[in-house]
Amino acid sequence: MKMEIIMAGFGGQGIMLMGEILAHSAMLEGREVSWIPSYGPEMRGGTANCMVVISDKRIPSPIISSPDVLVAMNKPSMEKFTPMVKSGGIVILNKALIDERPARDDIKVIEVDATGIADELGNMRVANMVALGVLIGETGIVKPETVIKSIDYFLPAHRKNMMEINEKALKRGIAEVQK
Amino acid sequence: MKMEIIMAGFGGQGIMLMGEILAHSAMLEGREVSWIPSYGPEMRGGTANCMVVISDKRIPSPIISSPDVLVAMNKPSMEKFTPMVKSGGIVILNKALIDERPARDDIKVIEVDATGIADELGNMRVANMVALGVLIGETGIVKPETVIKSIDYFLPAHRKNMMEINEKALKRGIAEVQK
Amino acid sequence: MEKVLMKGNEALAEAAIRAGCKCFFGYPITPQSELPAYLAREMPKRGGVFLQAESEVAAINMVYGAAGAGVRVMTSSSSPGISLKQEGISYLCGAELPCVIVNIMRGGPGLGDIQPAQSDYFQATRGGGHGDYRTIVLAPSSVQELVDLVYDAFDLADMYRNPVLILGDGILGQMMEPVVFKERPARQLPPKDWATTGKMGRQKPNVINSLYLDPVKLEEHNLKLFKKYQEIEAKEARYEILNGDDAEYFVIAYGICARIAHAAVEMAREEGIKVGLIRPITLWPYPKKAFEEVLPKAKAFLTVELSLGQMVEDVKLSVEGRAPVYFYGRTGGMVPTAEEIFEEIKKMRGLS
Amino acid sequence: MEKVLMKGNEALAEAAIRAGCKCFFGYPITPQSELPAYLAREMPKRGGVFLQAESEVAAINMVYGAAGAGVRVMTSSSSPGISLKQEGISYLCGAELPCVIVNIMRGGPGLGDIQPAQSDYFQATRGGGHGDYRTIVLAPSSVQELVDLVYDAFDLADMYRNPVLILGDGILGQMMEPVVFKERPARQLPPKDWATTGKMGRQKPNVINSLYLDPVKLEEHNLKLFKKYQEIEAKEARYEILNGDDAEYFVIAYGICARIAHAAVEMAREEGIKVGLIRPITLWPYPKKAFEEVLPKAKAFLTVELSLGQMVEDVKLSVEGRAPVYFYGRTGGMVPTAEEIFEEIKKMRGLS
Amino acid sequence: MSKIIIDKDRCKGCGLCIEVCPKKVLFFDNDMVNVLGYHPVAAKEGCIACGFCATVCPDVVFTIYREEKGGK
Amino acid sequence: MSKIIIDKDRCKGCGLCIEVCPKKVLFFDNDMVNVLGYHPVAAKEGCIACGFCATVCPDVVFTIYREEKGGK
Amino acid sequence: MKVVFERPKSLQATKTHYCPGCGHGVIHRLVAEVMDELGIQDKTIGVAPVGCAVLAYNYFDCDMQQAAHGRAPAVATGIKRALPDRVVFTYQGDGDLAAIGTAEIVHAAARGENITVIFVNNAIYGMTGGQMAPTTLVGQKTETSPYGRDPQIAGYPIRVCEMLATLDGPSFLARAELTDVKNINKTKSYIKKAFEMQLSGKGFSLVEILSPCPTNWGMKPKDAVDWVKNEMVKVFPPGVFKEPKEG
Amino acid sequence: MKVVFERPKSLQATKTHYCPGCGHGVIHRLVAEVMDELGIQDKTIGVAPVGCAVLAYNYFDCDMQQAAHGRAPAVATGIKRALPDRVVFTYQGDGDLAAIGTAEIVHAAARGENITVIFVNNAIYGMTGGQMAPTTLVGQKTETSPYGRDPQIAGYPIRVCEMLATLDGPSFLARAELTDVKNINKTKSYIKKAFEMQLSGKGFSLVEILSPCPTNWGMKPKDAVDWVKNEMVKVFPPGVFKEPKEG
Ligand SMILES: Cc1ncc(C[n+]2csc(CCOP(=O)(O)OP(=O)(O)O)c2C)c(N)n1
Ligand SMILES: Cc1ncc(C[n+]2csc(CCOP(=O)(O)OP(=O)(O)O)c2C)c(N)n1
Ligand code: SF4
Ligand code: SF4
Ligand code: SF4
Ligand code: SF4
Ligand code: SF4
Ligand code: SF4
Ligand SMILES: [Mg+2]
Ligand SMILES: [Mg+2]
C-alpha cells in the first residue's frame, strides 16, 4: 500500500496542518509517512502546498511527481496540480473557491463546498478539516478516530476549545462522500 | 655564469639593502637576477637574511640551498649558513662580531672588520657596504661604478648626503681584498 | 520507544540536546529557522544555553570559545552564513576544537534563493577556508538518520577533536517524518584535559591556539593533523549500497537527492534495468571503498546532485577512469523528479 | 623599455594602476603589506582611490559596490582574510561583477604563520563560498609574470564579468626581480552598460543583484553562468610545458614551487633522467589539455605543492588513471629545496 | 471640489487610511475582493483632499486632486 | 635600607626607568651587552625603593625590597 | 485641478510584496518623493539590504545594487568612491544595520562617508519570520526570545543614533516615528535633510525610522502603529541627534 | 625585608617579544597583578587577540585561548556562557577591537556580557608594521596614511568608551593613559575595578589604555610616552565613562 497526496491552497487555509494531521494519523496507525511543505517563491501570501506519502514500506522519495490524490482548496492549486494526478486518481475540490472543473476524464473528481460547510459550522478556518474528512471518507486511508487523536495532538492547549468544531468539520466531510 | 649569494646578519645591519644593491647592479649590467628576503619566525629582532641569484640565463629557482658566496655579518648567521656553502665557495665574515672561524677547509674564508672600518669612516651602518665591497672586490661579479649607481638609486632624496660615505665604505671593502 | 512526527530542523535540535549539547550559538537564516526557534524554547528549560549572535562570524567564534572551554556546542546556518564562517572553521580545525556545524543548504551563489540545494559540497568537503584542513561531513537523508547522525556528530567531534559538519538541505530541514530518539550507550571518549576551564590547581595553563610562528612547528602541527585525517579516512567513511549484489549501473547521490534517486532506481528495476544506488553518508571522508566493492561489476556511474556537478569529482577520483562517470544535476533550488533521474539512468545504459 | 627591480607586491600594485585600476579596498595583513602601502602612496597622486576598510568583509563588499559602478577595482589579502571574503566572492560571482582579488597565501589553518604556502588551492579553485560558481585563478611564478598577469586579470574580469583571483605566496610577494611594464594594446572589451552609474537619462534602471526568489529563474541564471564557465574553460586555460618533447616523467607545480621544481628538473636532466615540467598558469580553468599533450609519452606524474595535497586532485582528474600520480608537499610555511624534489623525481622513476 | 482616485487593486486592506480620515469618508468595500485577495477601500462623498489617507497608506493606493480656486 | 635586583637579561634598554627614578640612581651599563643585545640598566647607590622604575618598566626587570622598620 | 497627491516618479508602479500596514511601503514612498523633489533620480544609486526590503531594487526607479546582509554601507562606499558625484543611499533594516552590519555602519559613519542611510527600525527580523533584533525591546516576545527578551541573557536594545552621535564623521543623525500624519511628514523632512547633506558634501547622514511590522508583532496594522507610539518611542526617543552647526 | 615589587605570579617568567618601551609589557603586568590580588588566577581564562599581543597566551599564567582577529569578545562570550562561574577577559588592540571586531565588541557590550575587556589603544596596527588604525589621529602618518590621516578620505578616530557608553549593557567603562607612575597606578585601579564588576556579576566592563608603540610611531620610548600625554589624550580624554550608581 502506498498513497501519495498533494494538498494545496492559499496561505492561511490551513493546508500545512491538514497534511500534518493526515501524516500523523497514518503514523499512529503504523504506517511509514513523510510530509514536505512547499511555499511558493513569494515569501508571504501566494500559494502553499504540501506533499504527504503514506506507505507500508520505507518511503524512497517524499517528493511526489504523480499524486494519487489531490486536495485543491483554491483555483490556482487546481490548475497547477491536476495535470500531475495519476490516471485513476482522485481530485477533491473546494467548490466554494473553484468555479471550474478539471478537463480530465481519467480521474475521479469530488466537489465539496468545504468553505461553505465550515462557515455554516461557524468558522471558515475549519474548511481544511472538511476536505480532510472527504479524503478519508473516500479513501479510507486512516480511521476517523485516529484523525481525531491527531487533531487533538496538534491543537495547542489554549485552543482545545476548537476540538469540537474540528471534529464536526471532519465528520461533515466524511458524510459528504458517504451520503 | 651563475652565482648564488646568501647575506645574513642582525635586523638593522642593512642586510636586505646590501642584497638589493647587489641585485640591482647586476641587473644594470644585463644579468638576470633575483632577491628574496627572509625574516626569522620572530616578528621583530632576530636574524635577517636574503638570497641573491645572479645569472646569464633565466633563473629557475630564487631559493638557494648551496650558496657560492656567504656574507655573514654576525655569529649566528655564520653558524647557520656556513655548512650550506658550496665546496670551493667563499665566506665573507664580519670579524668585528665573529670571534670564530668556520671549521671547513674546502672554502675560502675572508675576514674583514666591516663594523670597525665603518665606525672609522664615521657611521657603523655602512658596514654593509664594506662587506659588499669585499664581495665585489673578490668576485668581480659587478663593477664598482655600477654598484655606486645602485647605491644612488636606493638612497632616498633626503639621504643623498650619505652617498659619499657609502662610496667610501664600498671602496674600502674592495681595497681590503685587493691589498 | 515512542515515534514522533517531527520536522528535520526540530528533530535535529532535539537530538542535539539529548546528545548533551550545552550551548548553541546562531544567527537567523532561512531555511533553518525552526532549529534555533526550537532551541530558544527548549534550552532554557533544559539547562542549556541558546544565544542569538550578532552575526554568523560571531556565532562561529562563540562556538570556538565554548568548544575550547570543553562543552558540547553547536551552530547552524544556511549557505551564505556558512560562507561567513569559513575563517572560524579554519581556526577550529587548526586549534582542534570539537563542535557540530549544521548547514541547511539553499540555492546560490550570492543571495540566491531559499529553496533546497546541494551546491555547498565543495565548500564542505574541500575546506572553504584557508590551509590544509578537513572537517568530517555527514549527509543524512531522512529525519531519523538526521537524529541518529547528530549523536554521531558530537561523538566524532570529541573523538577526533575536529569540527563535524551536518549537511542538509531545505527539504530535509522542513520535512516531517516519524522519528525515534533511541537511548544510546555512552561512548568511550577521550577526556577533555586540554580544555581551558581555568587552571583550577593544574600546573600548566591550557592554551587553545592555532598560531605557530616557526614554520617547522607549523609543519609538524599540520602533519599531526594530517595523520588524524588519515585515521578518520581509514575508519569513519560510511555509505549505503542498494542492489549491490547484481547491479551493473550505479546512481550515486546523497541527502534528499538519494531519496529521489532511490525512487528512480525502483522504477528502473521494474523495467528490468540492473541498477543500484551508492549513498555516501560521510562526504568527507568520502567512501571510496563503496566503489571498490562494486567496480568489478559496474559498467557505469551516474552522479545526481542538486548542483552543477561537485560530488561528481569525488566519484571520478574514486573510479579513476575504470568506468564512465555521468552527471545529472539541477541547481538554484530546483529538484529533479524520480522520472527525470530514471531517464538519465536509461541514457547511461544506452551509452555504456 | 626600462627594467626595474621590484618586489612582487609592489610590482603588482604598480601594474594594477597601469591596467586602469581606479579603486583599491583592503585590510592590512602580512605578507602582502607592501601592496597596500604602495597604493596608499601612489593612488592619491595618480587619480585613484586607496581606502583601508574596517575589515576584509567590508573590503570585498566595497569591491562589489565599485565593480557594480563600473570601475576597475582590486582588493588583496592573505589566507585568513580571504576566508572572510568568501560570502562576498560568492555574491560577486552571482551578480557577475568583474574585479581582481589577490591572495598572497600564508601557512594555515587558523592563524598559522606568515610564511609562504599554497594551501588555499581548494578554496581558490573549488569556491570557498556557497553555490555553483567559479573564479578565474591565475598563478604567476615570477615578478614579471605577476605584472603581465595583472593586466590579463583585469581584462578577463571585464570580458567575462567575473572575479579573477591572483594566487601568490609570501615569497613571490616579497621577492625582487627585474620587471618591464610593457605597454599593451587596448583589448576589445564589452561595454559596461549594465553598471549602476545613475540612470542618467537611461529608460530602465540598472540593477546589480544575485537574488532570484523563483528557483526556475535561479536555475536559468546558474545555467547561464555555467555556460560562461564552460566558455572560459574552453578558451582561457594556460600553462607552460618544459621538455615536453622528450620527457617521460613530469613534475607539476605552480607559482614559486614551479621555480624550485624547475631547478630540480634541471638537476635530474643533468643525470639523464628524462623529466619535464608542467606549470599551470591558470589554476581554474585547470589546463587539462597539457596532460593530453604529454600523456602519450608520460610514464608518471609528480605533483609538488606547498600543501598537503590539493592541486594533486586536479592532476588526477586530468590523468584519469592513465598513469600514476605521485605527490610531494611541504606545508605550514616550509619550502622544499630543489634537492628534495630531485629525490622525489628519482623515486618516481624507481616506482614506475 | 476635490477628486480622489483609489487604485483598488493595490489596496491591502490595512485600514490605516480609514482611521486617519478626518471626514470618515473611507470604508472597506466588502462586496469586492481585489487581485490581492483583499476587500479594498472605497470613498463616500465628502472628501476634502487633505491627503492624510495618502500620507499613511503604505501602498500608494490614492491619487488626490483639488480644484484650484483663485490665484493660489 | 632597600634592595633592588635587576634581571639584566630581561632589560631592553628603553630607558623609561632612568627617566622616572627620583633619585637618578639608574643608568645604562654600557660595558655590558645582554642576551637580547642591549646595554642593560644598572643601579648606583641611593635607591629609596619607591618602586617607580618597576611601575614603568615594560619588562619586569626589577625586584625591590625594603627593610621593614617598626610595627608597620 | 491641482494634484494633492500622486505616486512619485522615483517609485515604480509595481505592487510591493510588503504585508498590509507595513511601514516599508510608506518609507519607500517618502524616499522617492524626496528624490523627486531634489531632482536627483537620474544620478542616484540605491543599495538594497537583505531583509524584507531586499526587493527594493524592484520598487525604486533608480539604479540599484542589492548588497549582502549587513554590508550595504560598504557597498555604498564602493559606489561613492568610484563615482563621487552621484548620490548614493542605503536602505537597511535593524537586523541588517545593527546586528551583522554593525562594523560597516559604524565605520561608514566614522569615515564621514558621504552617503545617506535610511534605517528602518521595526524591532524585529521581519524577513526571516520574526526573530529577535538588536533593537527588540526588553520583554518583547519573538521567535528566538519566546519568553520575552531577557536582558540577563540577550542584553539590551542598541540605540543606533545615540551610538553614532559619539563619532565625528556624521553630519546628520535623526530618529523619526511612522505613527501619524505629522510624524510621517517629519520623517520625510529628515530624509530630505539627509540627502541635502550629501548633496552639499557634508558627509554621512542617517535617518532612523521607527516602523511597524504588524505581521511579526502579531498585531493588527493599527495596533502596530500604536505600539510604535506607545512602546518603541520610550526606548528610542525621536529627535535630531546630530546636525551641522549653522553658519 | 618587605617586597615592594616583584613579578606577579599570574605572569609567566618568559621574556616577551615586545619592542623596547612598548606599553603591552606594562599592561600585561598590571592585569597579572590584579589577578593575583583578586586571587582569581586559577579560575581565569584569558583571550588573546591577533595583534602584537597575540602571544599573550605565552605570558599570562592562566588558561588562555587565542582568538581570530577581532573576535575575542565572541570567543569570550562562548567561554563565559559555557562556564559562567569562571572569570573571562579579552586583551585586544585597537585594530582588533575597533576595526574588524567592531560588531563583536558593540554586541558583547550591548548584551552586558559578563566579561572584562582590556583594550590597548596605540593608534596603530602594531603587528602588521604600522598601518592606520581606527584610532589613528587626524594628520598622523602611517604606512597606509603616508601623507597623514586625511579625514576627507579616511575619516575620524573612533572613541570606543564614548561609543559604548551609549549602551545599557556595560557596567564599567574607563580610559587610562600609560604615561607616568600616577597614571599607571590609575590604570591598574581601573583594571581591578573592571574585574570586580565581573566577579559581582554586574556585566560587561572595559578599560581602554592609551599605550605607546615606539616602533611604529618611529619614536624613542620616552618620546612615545610624551606623545601619548600630549597628543593622544587630546582626542581620547581619560576618565570613567560608565560605572554603576552607588547603593
Ligand atoms: C549572511 C546572511 N545571514 C542571514 C541571512 C538571513 N536574513 C535575511 S533577512 C535577515 C534579517 C532581516 O531583518 P531586518 O534587517 O531587521 O529587516 P526587516 O526584514 O525587519 O525589514 C536575515 C537574518 C542572510 N540572508 N544572509
Ligand atoms: C582576518 C585577519 N585580518 C588581518 C590580519 C592581520 N593582522 C594581524 S594583527 C593586525 C592588527 C594589529 O593591530 P592592533 O589590533 O591595533 O594591535 P597592536 O599590534 O597594535 O597591538 C592585523 C590587521 C589577520 N591576522 N587576520
Ligand atoms: S484626502 Fe483626507 S478627507 Fe479625503 S479621503 Fe483622504 S483622508 Fe479623507
Ligand atoms: S491605507 Fe492603503 S492599503 Fe491600507 S486600507 Fe487604506 S488604501 Fe488600503
Ligand atoms: S625604586 Fe625608586 S629610587 Fe630605587 S631605582 Fe627604582 S625608581 Fe629609583
Ligand atoms: S624600563 Fe625596564 S626595560 Fe626599560 S631600560 Fe629600564 S629596566 Fe630596561
Ligand atoms: S514581515 Fe513585517 S517588515 Fe516584513 S513586510 Fe511584513 S510587516 Fe513589513
Ligand atoms: S610594534 Fe608597537 S605595539 Fe607592537 S610590540 Fe612593538 S612597540 Fe609594542
Ligand atoms: Mg527589522
Ligand atoms: Mg594597535
Image (cartoon, coloured by chain):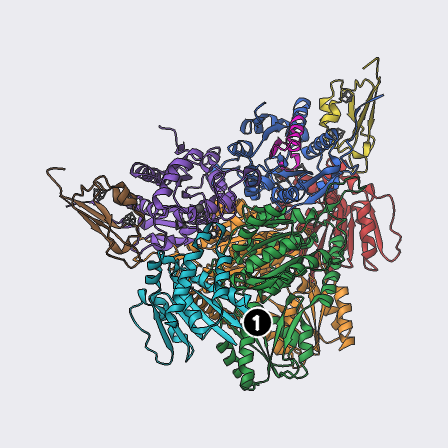
Chain colours: A red, B cyan, C orange, D green, E yellow, F brown, G blue, H purple
Q: Residues within 10 Å of mark 1 (few under 14, many from 20)?
A: many
* Residue H240 in view (yes/no): yes
- Residue furthest top as drawn: E70
Confirm whether residue C334 shows in the render.
no
Q: Total label count?
A: 1
| SS at mark 1 in the image | helix
- Residue range highlighted in magenta: G189-216
Amino acid on which the number 1 mark rests in the picture: Ala
Q: Nearer the viewer, residue C156 or H241?
A: H241
Q: Check the image and name the residue furthest to the left.
A: F70
Residue H104: x percent and y percent? 50, 44
Task: Give the quadrant of the C terminus of chain B.
Answer: bottom left
In the image, taking residue C299 as reference, residue H102 lies left or right, namely left
Between D101 and H21, the residue placed more toward the observer is H21
- Residue C308 point in image, percent of width and height: 70, 63
The question of residue D180 being in magenta is answered with no
| Rendering quadrant holding ligand 4 | top right
Examine the image and state in which quarter residue G7 appears. top right
Ligand 2 contact, mark 1 (Cβ < 8 Å): no
Which residue is tagged 1? Answer: D258
Left/right placement of residue G155 relative to residue C351 reads left
Percent x, y of residue C8: 61, 54
Q: E62 or E66, which lies in front? A: E66
Question: Which quadrant holds residue H173?
Answer: top left
Q: Position of residue H216 (x, y in %)?
A: 43, 48
User: Is D226 on the left or on the right of C2, as rendered?
Assistant: right
Where on the picture, by quarter, is residue D258?
A: bottom right
Q: Nearer the viewer, residue H134 or C34?
A: H134
Look at the picture and state if C269 lies above or below G11: below
Q: Is residue G195 magenta?
A: yes
The residue located at (29%, 57%) in the rendering is C203
**Mark 1 chain:** D
